[in-house]
Image (cartoon, coloured by chain):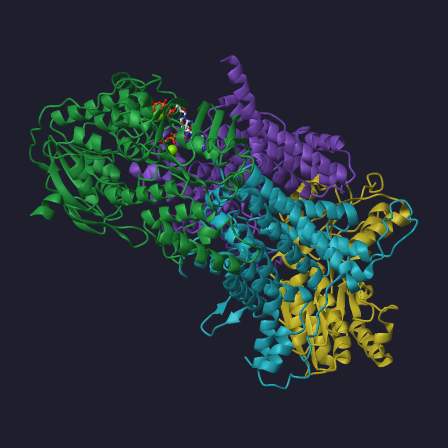
Chain colours: A green, B yellow, C cyan, D purple
Amino acid sequence: MTGQPETAAPDAPAIELVGISKAFGPVQANKDISLKVRRGTIHGIVGENGAGKSTLMSILYGFYTADRGEIRIGGVPTKIQNSDDAIRAGIGMVHQHFMLVQPFTVLENVVLGAEEGRLLKPSLARARKLLTDLAREYELEVDPDAVVGDLAVGFQQRVEILKALYRQADILILDEPTGVLTPSEADHLFRILEGLKAQGKTIILITHKLREIMAVTDTVSVMRRGEMTATVQTADTSPAQLAELMVGRRVLLRVEKTPAVPGETVMQVRGLKVTDGHGVERLKGIDLDLRAGEVLGIAGVAGNGQSQLLEVLAGIAPASGGSVSFKGQPLDLSRTADPKYRRRLGIAHVPEDRHRLGLIMPFAEWENNCFGYHDRPRYQARWGLMDRNAMRDDARERIEKYDIRPPSCDLKAANFSGGNQQKIVIAREIENDPDVLLIGQPTRGVDIGAIEFIHNQIVAMRDRGKAILLVSVELDEILGLSDRILVMFDGAISGERLSRETDEGELGLLMAGIDPKRAST
Amino acid sequence: DGHTNFNPAVIFDLGGKFDRSFNQAAYEGAERFKEEFGVEYREFEIQSDAQREQALRRFAEAGNNPIVVAGFAQASAMEAVAAEFPDTQFQIIDAVVDLPNVRSVVFKEEEGSYLVGMLAAMKSETGTVGFVGGMDIPLIRAFACGYVQGAKAVNPDITVIQNMTGTTGAAWNDPVRGGELATGQIQQGADVVYHAAGGTGRGVLQAAADAGAFGIGVDSNQNYLHPGSVLTSMLKRVDVATYNAFKDAMDGNFTVGVQTLGLAQEGVGYAVDDNNRALLTDEMTAAVEEAKAKIVSGEISVHDYRSDDSCPVS
Amino acid sequence: MDLAELFQLFDSTMRNAAPLLLACLAGLFSERSGIFDIGLEGKMLAAAFASAAVAAWAAAPYVADPFPGQISGLGLGWAAAWLGVTAGMLAAIAMSALHGFASITLRGNQLISGVAINFLAAGVTVLVGEALFSMGGQTPQLTGAARFTAIELPLAETRRGIPVIGPFYADVISGQVILVYIALLAVPLTAWILFSTRFGLRLRAVGENPGAVDTAGISVTRQRYSAVLICGVLCGIAGAYLSMGTSAAGFVKDMTAGRGFIALAALIFAKWRPWPALWACLLFGLLEAIGSKYQNVDVGAFVIPVQFMQALPYILTVVILAGFIGKAIPPKAGGQPYVKER
Amino acid sequence: MSKTLPRWADLILIPAINVLLAFFVAGLVVMFIGEDPVHAMGIMIRGALGSDYGIGYTLFYATSFICTGLAVAVAFHASIFNIGGEGQAGVAGIGVALVCLTLDQTHWLLTLPLAILGAMAFGAAWAAVPAYLQARRGSHIVITTIMFNYIASALLVYLLTNIFKMPGSMAPESRRFEDGANIPRLDQMADWIGLDMARSPANISLFVALIACVLVWLLIWRSRLGYEIRAFGFSDKAAVYAGISPFRITMITMLISGALAGLMAINTVMGDLQRLNLDSVLGAGFVGIAVALMGRSHPVGVVLAALLFGVLYQGGAELAFEIPAIPSQMILTIQALVILFTGSLENMVRFPMERLFLFINRGRA
Ligand SMILES: Nc1ncnc2c1ncn2[C@@H]1O[C@H](COP(=O)(O)OP(=O)(O)OP(=O)(O)O)[C@@H](O)[C@H]1O
Ligand SMILES: Nc1ncnc2c1ncn2[C@@H]1O[C@H](COP(=O)(O)OP(=O)(O)OP(=O)(O)O)[C@@H](O)[C@H]1O
Ligand SMILES: [Mg+2]
Ligand SMILES: [Mg+2]
């Protein structure tokens, strides 16, 4: 119990935020936020992507400084200007993107910043001992001498928690800790959190998964567009109510669609293998058939090879083994694979990460509108120059058709909101009328209205007899859109189901590598 | 009428007027003229090859006359510019430019080097002496060849270690490398090291002094740099050539054509002053003076490397 | 080639390697903290000038009542050399601080800042030198206590008789300038700082993942500034060695002659580790020694021209960078400014 | 990718303030060495622009800087930092010399186009190796191009001392080209149309450089290749997604960049020296960096910045003639300051500006 100010009132909230505001340039990420977190509870925070959850927690942890507002720890106004102040105040944080030094050992990562003296040796020795104690106490075993970069994400997360405990944190913030975990790993984590809570620690848990909120939190706060819209007792609320609070209107998540009429197989994948730069096998022999007129969903916890599958099929990453044929023609899977050529064949790709891959942010909308298709004859003028009028005309047409806002093709991609950026990409890939659409996380960071629109476009495409391979970590989306579902676990396919014959529970088990059917037979 | 537009200028070569050697000699000649006659002169230090033509043209354009240019590297710039300004008088040192308004001054460096070669051989106790050249060009080879001839004349068995600093203009201004080369020669047994390397020589003389060996300076009198450690300096009277150009032009006596300055014309020589007098014994001086007389009289002929691009001894 | 000749080569190697090694370790500190530094060359050059200028000034006799235009020296002959080194360090630190300001505080492009620093040093040294000494940018010749001279190590001459080791000790190890020994000692010291101290741990961490350092409650800015300043100190000694520890005995313009870049190449070759840095610098020092000692190398069938020998360090650098000697992976956060708020 | 700054502020205001800052600091340096900066400035401007002789030299230098500036700019668009312009231009001189020495008995109308090809081919070839190493082996192109600058100068020395050197001459330079390789100077061209102009080395390659500007503009902003270069420059990952080969773009961009740098050899070797010597490049390869940074990698900006540096070089030379106490390193210093202020210290002006504009915009909203 260090760092707790002496003068703390015994029943004051562990944390109290008053009127916190924060702007990033023109983006107002947090607007006048107030929040109380009771000591010894697990407090959930939910909200759409970009709602400002991480920003708020980073302010509490001293990573950012608020433009306005006050932080009270145990009732005492506390200035938190950097993480050091936060650590002193007894706050620990497990970041959404881990803050670990990959080439360091677990031990080095744990002592970093909390060393005893100028020399390392004594610190490391002391830390080793403390670590073993902590590990025993909280089921947090990790090899202290392992290099962090070699550890699986679940273990890396443990290191993050150990870091906080090593600094004797009383308040632990976890930012989307389960996004990278399998259901069973998540269960393990929640057991740890319950244990910490029993010790009197205060926990703030950010997550998108309403199930988790309902299961472990005592209180839940909802954020929307930078504002704190509500704080309720978990026992008094329901997932439906939370969803409504998050997006500001009643949510209709069912996709309206008719049963699929699958045609012939357009893409056939056999024994596909991928080895990454570190020599780790990320795909361990994938077989799949993609048929015309169906949506094939790929479910799975992030990091189980879905991204690699998408990249290899799109031609932006090489395979180390196996084969893929498209309409009976084998595709070249070597490092020279050319996405342009794939597109010409009729394979379009909406990447998982539109910021990094799908758009050139400083390009104008009309330039992005033909990105990847810029070698098409209709965009060429004489002498290797491009036909800018044709490019603009196409862009305007699609802005109209996809209701992209603001409706200006001269605006830079960076100046569109997340949902509209996604629409630009999807419009481009669908309007070129491919036979196969590879689409990753189509609605990540996209608001409800746009989600409906995008889902309808995908279904319409299917109804035109096209094949769609959908990768998403959102089970609801997979279940709602797909006709057939493959679940990936650890680089392999752990099961295949027809969407009308399965449910979240069964898919959740498959995502953890457990096949309930096979287990029972 | 040469008198009416007398407006002298001098252009120094890479290494700059304070190289304590070749360019500094030219500078001192100009300064002496300025002091004696109270006439200001314009000057420019070349920093790169590309400036040569512009510098010459700039001075000629501005009506400077005569324009003295130090260094062989100016020859081709001079060819171009002197032809453009036929009424301006030019003097180039160390190269021959065949134009009706150009005086070319060349020296018999081999003769002066012969004398200091003799001194080196007489001073050497190890039977090994060294030579560090600047840029590897025939001119510097001529220094080396004269030096070897003089040394061998005293001691036919003497070993002369020779190194060149480089093949570009930068070789005139690299004392670190010069010192490294001299140190190497001294480690191989040389106890007298002669340099013909402009600013690079600063490192050569320093290394010799540090190692307790003797250095021999070049062009200017460098005996003062390390009193007691510089055996002598091979004088090349660039100062006189510069001074004379100014003076002749002032008096309206500027002549064109090639001037070759050797021992006979006192254009080259070796330096004796308070800094090195104690280092030279009477026999040494006597032997050198005798050789000098013989060279002047033609009894000894020192081979000029430049005449056939080769040296009979090494 | 006999042993004596070999040892002469090694002796020369040590002298050539010393400034490379100091600059290389300087770069190591900077780059391990995530700040790329192609301005080593310029910092060395600035230091070479500042140290020679201050040493010359300190050693010059004190004139109580200088006539107009005359500058009085300090008359501190005995301390001149060390005052010079200090000045060199300060000059390099000033350049480092500029680089740090540009790349840490202002999050500017580190490569461009390095390039600018190289030009700035090349220009300013001559400008200031000319203004102070009017000698074409040179400093006066340093004499006596204003420069460093070789020191004999104990036992060098008495134990020369021991075969191989004796002459090696006497000819190669002994008889160097003190700055050479400082350069050699800097290697274990760097290794110790890097791997055995808290400072070293944080330094390595900040070059790999500044976010991790920041969230651990350590100031990334402070950590990077200290690294950059250490870089300045070491570059300062490297520059001082060039103008005060070699036969140049003073400053001449552009006297670093690309050594900063070779040091950088050695750093990459050494994969940003201190002991390999020593070997890499010795290798480049040896190449330089060979290049000046054996000018046109006759290998029987043909003659390797001197230009090739002189370009050899640069060619080797390219070969090393091409990864034929194993891939060198730089500190992960190297070259990128640490930005929290996009 | 700033959302807060208007375009004009980004393209004009900030560079202008930065250049002013650079000159202000340069003025302080002049003051430090005991000269009057205003007087020095006067000499520079008069020396560079006060006579047709001065203007001629200014244009001559500017021609070289346009070429090397374009070279750096084109590479910048692909996010490649080519500091090898010095070596590429130096080696390009060999190409020019080979053409000229072989064909100088003919006519410049034949020699010039071939020499242009030679210059561009040799310049590109010298850029090809670092480009290949970057694209295939990930070798840092900044360091490899620096190394190639040194290697180029060693190569040049070797060729000039062993192959090109005239027998009997001491200077490491080729023989002078005959009339067939003498391209028209600006004063000669002025003469054709009856104008009188003092002799200076400015020559027809100024127009070659200006044509190169137009072509570069078309390439970068109007052609498919330029589209791909810019896309790759903004995001190499996204480029791969779009089927743009990083290898191909890196190679092509660097070849174009090297060829442009090489183009300046026409101006110096053919237009001025009329022979090959050791330092025909005169640091122009490095000036190109400052020119490209200042010109925001746009051909119009490059031309303006090249003119500024032309003034600086010619005015600086004049300064060194008039005030020997200010050595020609003054130019190098100003160049360094310009690179510093417009390149790495740019944010010193940009950050406050962004805040200012944010404030103004908020006020309006
Ligand atoms: N460092 C930053 N610089 C600029 N803008 C930022 C930065 N971090 C976040 N933002 C912006 O602030 C807003 C809130 O982001 P924040 O990361 O807090 O959202 P979040 O609720 O955590 O979203 P997610 O669920 O996706 O993690 C978004 O518009 C985001 O783009
Ligand atoms: N990381 C960021 N950096 C800078 N600007 C951002 C960032 N994220 C968002 N913006 C800007 O903020 C505005 C709002 O973006 P945001 O993604 O929060 O929109 P949104 O309200 O979530 O819209 P949508 O529902 O379409 O996603 C956009 O104009 C965008 O340009
Ligand atoms: Mg977040
Ligand atoms: Mg959004």
Foreground pick, C114 / D293 = C114
| Quadrant of res B112 | bottom right
Look at the image and tell me in which quarter the N terminus of chain C lies. Answer: bottom right
Q: Position of residue A77 (x, y in %)?
A: 55, 30
Residue furthest out toward the front: A10
Classify residue D147 as left or right of residue D348.
left
Residue D247 at what x, y percent from top left?
35, 45
Residue D359 position in % (x across, y down) = 54, 19
Q: Could you tell whether C119 is left or right of A482 in the image?
A: right
Q: Position of residue C222 (x, y in %)?
A: 58, 44
Task: Find ligand 1 in the image and state its quadrant.
Answer: top left
Looking at the picture, does residue B288 appear above or below residue C224? below
C107 shown above or below A450: below
Which residue appears at 68% of the width and 84% of the height? C158
Looking at the picture, tell me which residue is in the foreground, B170 or D122.
B170
Quadrant in the rendering for residue C13: bottom right
Left or right? Give the position of B65 relative to D95: right
> Would you say residue D127 is visible in this rendering?
no
Q: Nearer the viewer, residue A317 or A197?
A: A197
The residue lying at 61 percent from left, 82 percent from top is C166
Q: Is residue A275 above or below residue C281?
A: above
Comparing D344 with B97, the one in front is D344
